[in-house]
Image (spheres, rainbow, N blue to C red):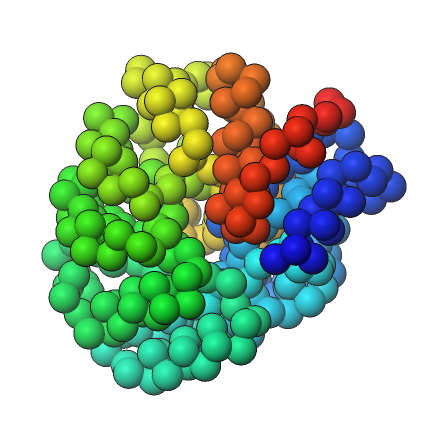
């Protein structure tokens, strides 16, 4: 962790490979098998550097590709273990005990820094009492790593029992719960202080609860970001075909849209007070993932 933090500081204040924009933490990346078909790990790293991304997490199918991206970029790209061991595992990971064996092995090695992204769907599966899901939560607790979870439900109450039953697990809640509005998110954050919320940028196309047609924050969001300013983070989630008609048979060109995704984030973030914007854009993720309080070390930033 000390090494990662040192590299982060160097990246923030070194200029040659980074653009002039403010540094950014992208807490939700993918580098999947159907993305590697059309873009290399090295090219992905270049695109991240072009947007001054100084800290990132990546989950991949299969998980080995997350390690490949981290090796191409350095320890500032933190690989998470994905339970989707193969493309086919996306719909049946919670039925395969091999997932727990591989997760334990990967986390014990120290190569993986978290677990996820992991999807649970209300009414589809897995159930909250699923053996594999609970086993992964136990491993997150054992190794004290973040747990990136994507819940697709019409209510925050679907997620609440999990975060309450595992109070020492640091949950990262993808997409702010998806289609939920600020009032629901507020209730869950009150009930589960171990939940950090990330607002992945697929929202403009798939989710319509964050901004209006002019990319202005909808009512309730600004107040929520300020209220929980230490627990919100941002991410790009550069997965494209899922957003446009479930075209799983085609290669995923999400990385071709990375400029567009980052532009969206930087636009709505400017609508927040400067101190809150900096926390959500960068320092909350730094503190969560490195265990370091960034403080003044990130206060000098060039626009």
The tally of labels here is 0
Using the image as rendered, state which of residue 74 and residue 261 is in the foreground.
74
Residue 283 occupies quadrant: top right
Q: Is residue 67 visible?
A: yes
Q: Is residue 260 left or right of residue 10?
A: left
Residue depicted at x 79% and y 37%: 13
In the depicted view, which residue is nearer to us: 113 or 116?
A: 113
Q: Quadrant of the N terminus?
A: bottom right
Quadrant, the C terminus: top right
Q: Is residue 91 visible?
A: no
Q: Residue at x 36, y 69 (%)?
A: 142
Q: Is residue 40 above or below residue 87?
A: above
Residue 159 place in picture, x, y as percent: 20, 49
Q: Is residue 45 above or below residue 70?
A: above
Q: Residue furthest right?
A: 16
* Residue found at x 60% / y 69%: 67
x 43%, y 60%: residue:
145
Where does the image place residue 191, in percent across and percent down from the top left?
A: 20, 38
The percent coordinates of residue 38 (x first, y second) are 64, 63
Relative depth, front residue between 154 and 55 = 55
Residue 165 left/right relative to 60? left
Q: 19 or 252: which is nearer to us?
A: 19
């Amino acid at each position: 962790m000390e090494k990662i933090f040192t590299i982060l500081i160097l990246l923030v204040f070194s200029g040659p490979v980074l653009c002039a924009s403010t540094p950014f933490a992208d807490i939700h990346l993918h580098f999947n098998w159907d993305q590697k078909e059309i873009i290399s790990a090295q090219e992905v790293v270049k695109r991240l550097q072009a947007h001054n991304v100084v800290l990132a997490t990546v989950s991949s199918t299969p998980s080995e590709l997350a390690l490949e991206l981290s090796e191409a970029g350095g320890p500032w790209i933190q690989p998470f273990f994905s339970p989707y061991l193969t493309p086919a595992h996306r719909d049946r990971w919670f039925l395969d005990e091999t997932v727990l064996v591989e997760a334990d092995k990967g986390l014990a090695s120290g190569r993986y820094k978290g677990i996820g992204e992991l999807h649970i769907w209300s009414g589809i599966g897995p159930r909250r009492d699923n053996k594999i899901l609970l086993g992964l939560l136990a491993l997150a607790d054992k190794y004290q790593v973040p747990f990136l979870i994507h819940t697709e439900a019409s209510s925050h109450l679907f997620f609440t029992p999990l975060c309450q039953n595992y109070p020492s697990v640091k949950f990262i809640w993808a997409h702010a719960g998806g289609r939920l509005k600020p009032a629901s998110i507020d209730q869950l954050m009150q009930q589960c202080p171990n939940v950090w919320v990330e607002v992945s940028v697929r929202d403009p196309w798939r989710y319509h609860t964050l901004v209006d047609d002019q990319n202005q924050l909808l009512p309730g969001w600004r107040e929520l970001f300020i209220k929980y300013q230490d627990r919100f983070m941002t991410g790009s989630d550069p997965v494209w075909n899922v957003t446009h008609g479930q075209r799983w048979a085609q290669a995923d060109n999400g990385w071709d849209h990375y400029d567009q995704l980052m532009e969206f984030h930087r636009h709505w973030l400017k609508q927040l007070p400067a101190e809150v914007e900096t926390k959500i854009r960068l320092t909350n993720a730094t503190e969560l993932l490195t265990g370091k309080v960034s403080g003044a070390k990130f206060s000098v930033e060039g626009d």
